[in-house]
């Protein structure tokens, strides 16, 4: 057994200098571990792409997987395995976590709808429909205006850090919180009427909690907290991509920008200048 181990790892005993015989270009143990982790992440991206099949995001998810696979092949061929690990730490890990969470929330929502649809025949329809579904019907009947609008003042703290790859919209953008402007949202009253309300970074605790309660009702998310507003370019369901002020939420350890036009979540991260 010892002879077999020596033939596998070579004669050097130091952990950092051991080589794996038969690995591409005789990479060291740490580099082989990085490559294995990279392959694991690629498998997760491929699985995520499969789960998005049949949705408008399917081509984009496939493009992210293929781009990541090409980056893996390029960096391994150049023996830049450490750079490959850094690429995954800075991009892939957060991307997988964020979009898996979005899919899970969507699935939970679909499960709730299915459960309410197949409920007891003796239950009145008004009792079976959830508060979130009633709110959606109110929004549809009211024909609400676009709620993602550009900032009208000259004060803008949006930082465009530029694309990092050829599929920029699916990489996690860096944003800055706008501490001046407020966004408008429409909340239901007990009389099932929609009334406009506003919330911003400087809003009172009560105003922020009211917005969080609205989000829990509208999205079905628990333990979601409101961070502030940010100016971002965000996709709509209709294919138009407006640039406007949207709320930023903290949920399950990550930040998301919320499109108030169609209530889709998009992962983001706070821009921090170097040295801070």
Image (cartoon, rainbow, N blue to C red):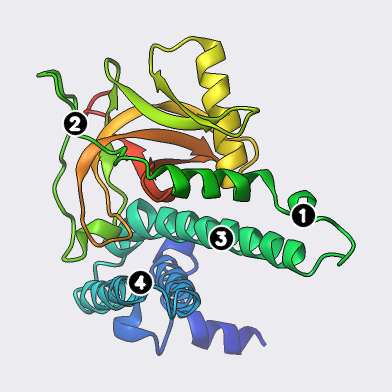
Report x, y in % for residue 60.
30, 71
Mark 1 or mark 3: name the one nearer the start of the chain.
3
| Total numbered badges shown on the rendered structure | 4
- Marks 2,3: beta carbons within 8 A: no
Mark 3 or mark 4: name the one nearer the start of the chain.
4
Which quadrant would residue 46 be assigned to in this image? Answer: bottom left
User: Does residue 38 show up?
Assistant: yes
Q: Residues within 10 Å of mark 3 (few under 14, many from 20)?
A: some
Residue in front for this viewpoint, 205 or 167: 205
| Residue that appears at 42% across and 86% down | 21
Left or right: where does residue 106 sit relative to residue 195? right
- Tell me the SS state at disc 3: helix
Residue in front for this viewpoint, 203 or 261: 261
Left or right: where does residue 243 sit relative to residue 177? left
> In this figure, which residue is indicated by the disc labeled 3?
106
Mark 2 or mark 4: name the one nearer the start of the chain.
4
> In this figure, which residue is indicated by the disc labeled 4?
56
Q: Residues within 10 Å of mark 1 (few under 14, many from 20)?
A: some
Pair 2/4: label in front:
4
User: Does residue 252 show up?
Assistant: no
* The N terminus - image quarter: bottom right
Residue in front for this viewpoint, 102 or 36: 102
> In this figure, which residue is indicated by the disc labeled 2?
158
> In this figure, which residue is indicated by the disc labeled 1?
128
Q: CA distance from mark 2 to mark 3?
A: 29 Å
Q: CA distance from mark 1 to mark 3?
A: 20 Å
| Residue that appears at 16% across and 66% down | 166
- Tell me the SS state at disc 2: loop
Q: CA distance from mark 2 to mark 1?
A: 43 Å
- Tell me the SS state at disc 1: helix
């Amino acid at each position: 057994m010892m002879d077999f181990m020596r033939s596998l790892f070579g004669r050097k005993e130091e952990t950092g200098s051991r080589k794996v015989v038969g690995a591409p270009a005789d990479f060291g143990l740490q580099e082989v571990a990085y490559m294995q982790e990279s392959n694991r992440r690629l498998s997760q991206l491929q699985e995520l792409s499969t789960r998005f099949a049949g949705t408008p995001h399917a081509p984009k998810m496939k493009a992210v997987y293929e781009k990541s696979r090409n980056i893996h092949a390029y960096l391994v061929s150049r023996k830049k395995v450490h750079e490959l690990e850094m690429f995954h730490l800075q991009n892939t890990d957060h991307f997988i976590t964020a979009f898996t969470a979005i899919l899970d929330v969507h699935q939970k929502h679909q499960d709730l709808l299915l459960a309410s649809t197949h409920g007891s025949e003796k239950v009145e329809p008004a009792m079976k429909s959830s508060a979130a579904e009633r709110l959606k019907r109110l929004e549809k009947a009211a024909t609400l205006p676009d709620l993602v609008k550009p900032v009208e003042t000259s004060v803008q703290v949006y930082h465009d850090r530029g694309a990092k790859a050829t599929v920029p919209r699916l990489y996690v953008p860096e944003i800055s919180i706008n501490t001046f402007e407020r966004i408008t949202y429409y909340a239901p009253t007990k009389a099932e009427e929609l009334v406009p309300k506003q919330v911003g970074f400087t809003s009172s605790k009560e105003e922020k909690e009211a917005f969080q309660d609205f989000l829990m009702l509208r999205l079905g998310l628990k333990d979601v907290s409101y961070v502030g507003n940010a100016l971002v370019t965000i996709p709509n369901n209709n294919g138009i991509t407006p640039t406007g002020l949207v709320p930023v939420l903290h949920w399950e350890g990550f930040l998301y920008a919320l499109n108030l036009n169609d209530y889709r979540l998009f992962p983001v991260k706070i821009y921090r200048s170097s040295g801070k």
